[in-house]
Amino acid sequence: MTETYNFSSGLKKAAAIFLGAGLLAVILGAFLAGGHGIDRVWSNLLICTYYFTGIGLASIFLIAAHQIGYGGWHVLIKRIPEAMGSIVPVMGVFLLIILAGTLFHGHHLYFWAQEGIYDPSSANYDAIIANTQGKSVYLNSVFYAIRIIAYIALWSAAIYAMRNISKKEDVLGVSATYQKSKYIAAIFILIFAVTSSTGSWDIVMSVDPHWYSTLFGWYNFASYMVGALAVMILIVAYLQSQGHLKQVNDEHYHNLAMFMFGFSVFYTYLWFSQFMLIWYGNMPEETTYFAMRFDNGLYKFLFYASLIINFFFPFLVLMKRKAKRNTELLVFVAIVLFFGHWLDFYNMITPGTMTDHTTHESNAGFGLIEFGMLSTFIGIFIFVVFNTLTKQSLIPVNNPYLKESITHHTLK
C-alpha cells in the first residue's frame, strides 16, 4: 500500500511563477509606492510570515489532537498536514529577519522598540506604554528577542519530533512508536496551548501596544485554523487529481469541510465577542483599536468584508450536507477562505504598522506589494510542502487506524 509522490515539473513551474512574479510585484510596488513602499514591504512580510506560520502550526495541532483523541478518519491524509508543518522552520527564518529589523531599527513595525520610548526626556517617549504596569518589563527588545527565538526553537523541535516518529512508524511498526507518538503529541499540544496565545500577543497584538484583548490568541487561532483546513482541502484535491490518494472519498472531504465550517463559526463567535465587549465597555484603551479601523475607508471596508467572506459565505454555502461532499465546490470555498483570512490578518496588522503615531495618519496601501508578497509566500509554501511529501510514503502504512480511515463513513 506504500504510495510515493514525485514533485511534478508542472507544479514546480507553478511555484516558480508564484515566487518570481510575487517578488517582481513587490519590487515594482515598492518603487511605485515611494517613501512608504519599504514600510509596506516590512508590514506584508510580517503578515504573510505570521499567517503561514499559523497554518503550519494549526496543521500539526490537528494531527496531535487526533493522535491523543484516538481519531482514525484522518490517517489517509495525515501526511499532508505533517508536510504543511514543515513550513514553520522556514517561516522561522523570516521571523528572525523581522526580529533583526526590530533590534537594529530596520523597520517601524513595533514602535515600542524605538529608543527612548520609556524615557520621559526622549522625543520618542510614550506615556501610555511607559505608565502601564508591566509593559516595560514585557515589551523590551531583549525579552522580546528571547521569546521569539524560543518560539521558533520550540515549534521547530516539536514539529520535527512529530514528523520523525511518523517516519519511524513506517519502518519500525506501530509497537515501537505508537505510545511514544502520543507522548510527543501531548507535549506539542501543551507547547501550542501556551505559545499560540503568547505568540499572537508578541507578533501581532504588540503592533498596537496601547491596546489589548484577552480573546486575541483564540481569535488568531480560529483564523489560521480555517486557513490550514482550506489549504488541506486544496492539497488533497490536487493530489487526487494527479492520481494519488485514491482511497480518500467523500467522507474525508465531509469531515474536513465540517471542521472548516465549524471553525468559521467559532471564528465569528470570537470576532463578535471581542467587538461587542469592547464596544459595550467603551474604554478608551480598548476602543482605540476599532476607532483606528473605522476612521480609515480601506480598513473599514476590509473589516466588514472579512466578516462577510469568512462567516456569511461559508455559513450559507456549506450549510447543506451535499455541499460538504462536493469537491469542486469545496475547492472554491477553500480558495475564498484562504484569501479571506489573509485579509483578516492584513486588517489586524497593517493599521498598527502603517500608522504614523505622531500625526495618526495611515500610510497603508493595497496593491502590488500586498498581492506580490502573498504570491511569493505561496510559491515558497508549495516548494517546501510538496518537496516534503516526496520524503516518505503518502500513506502511513503501519498506522493502527489506517483500516478505520479507509473504511471511514459518516451517518447517512
Image: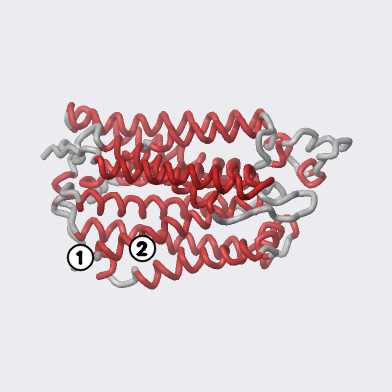
Residue on which disc 1 sits:
411
At label 2, the amino acid type is: Val
Residue 289, quarter of the rendered image: bottom right
Taking the image as shown, residue 366 lies to the left or right of residue 68, namely right
User: Which sits in the foreground, 21 or 287?
Assistant: 21
| Mark drawn on residue 333 | 2
Q: Secondary structure at mark 2?
A: helix
Residue 68 visible to the viewer: no
Q: Secondary structure at mark 1?
A: loop
Across and down, in percent, residue 356 comes to: 74, 50
Query: Is 159 rendered above or below residue 283?
Result: above
Picture residue at 55% right of the left edge, 53% below the top = 346
Q: Give the mark nearer the N terminus: 1 vs 2.
A: 2
Across and down, in percent, residue 135 comes to: 72, 40
Residue 189 visible to the viewer: yes
At label 1, the amino acid type is: Leu
Closer to us: mark 1 or mark 2? 2
Across and down, in percent, residue 220 comes to: 51, 51
Name the residue at the left extreme.
Answer: 1
Q: How is the image coloured?
A: secondary structure
User: Which sits in the foreground, 160 or 184?
Assistant: 160
Query: Is 254 rendered above or below residue 182?
Result: below
Q: The C terminus appears in which quarter of the rendering?
A: bottom left
Picture residue at 55% right of the left edge, 31% below the top = 96
Q: How far separated are the C-alphas under marks 1 and 2?
A: 23 Å
Query: Is 244 rendered above or below residue 284?
Result: above
Across and down, in percent, residue 65 comes to: 35, 45
| Mark drawn on residue 40 | none
Residue 123, quarter of the rendered image: top right
Answer few, some or many: residues within 10 Å of disc 1's Cα (few below 14, many 20 plus, some between 14 and 19): few
User: Which sits in the foreground, 50 or 41?
Assistant: 41
Q: The N terminus appears in which quarter of the rendering?
A: top left
